[in-house]
Amino acid sequence: DQTSKAFKEINPELTKAECPEFIQMRKQDQPSPLINDPIEKINIGTEESLKILQIETSLSVEERKELIDFLKKHQEAFAWTYEDMPGLDTKLVEHRLPLKPECKPIKQKLRKLDP
């Protein structure tokens, strides 16, 4: 195969599996491990205007306090509502149902798909 030929031309002593570039490419192909650390939900907003974020519980008390203070200080960097994202076009994400105003809505009976 052409890839093996290219590896042998670059460095005849290296096999394809030993080539550092190949090893790096293989690492990139593998999915990243899932984070299993427990998380907690925190509110960086007010009681009237909740702004919930999730942070790790494995942080030290000082790290946790610094992180929460930082997030509260920079909470304007987050888009909390759709209105906070002015660059998005509402025609792309707004859902509309083409209803006829003269037709009365009815409730249909439930249809079982898997008996």
Image (cartoon, rainbow, N blue to C red):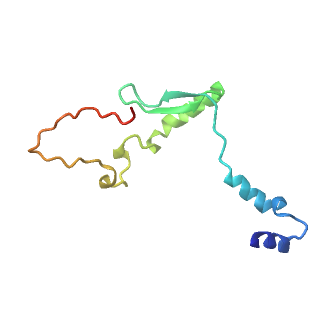
Task: Farthest residue to the front: give it.
Answer: 115
Which quadrant would the N terminus be assigned to in this image? bottom right
Establish if 12 lies above or below 66.
below
In the displayed structure image, the side of residue 59 where residue 7 appears, left or right: right
In the displayed structure image, the side of residue 60 where residue 109 appears, left or right: left
Q: Residue 12 appears at what percent x and percent y?
A: 89, 70
State the residue at coordinates (46%, 39%). Answer: 75
Judge by depth and name the residue closer to the eye, 67 or 102: 102
In the displayed structure image, the side of residue 38 where residue 114 appears, left or right: left
Establish if 77 lies above or below 37.
below
In the displayed structure image, the side of residue 50 where residue 69 appears, left or right: right
Q: In which quarter of the image is residue 17?
A: bottom right
Judge by depth and name the residue closer to the eye, 106 or 114: 114
State the residue at coordinates (69%, 54%). Answer: 28
Counting the numbered discs, the total is 0
Which quadrant would the C terminus be assigned to in this image? top left
State the residue at coordinates (91%, 67%). Answer: 13
Q: Residue 48 appears at what percent x and percent y?
A: 35, 27
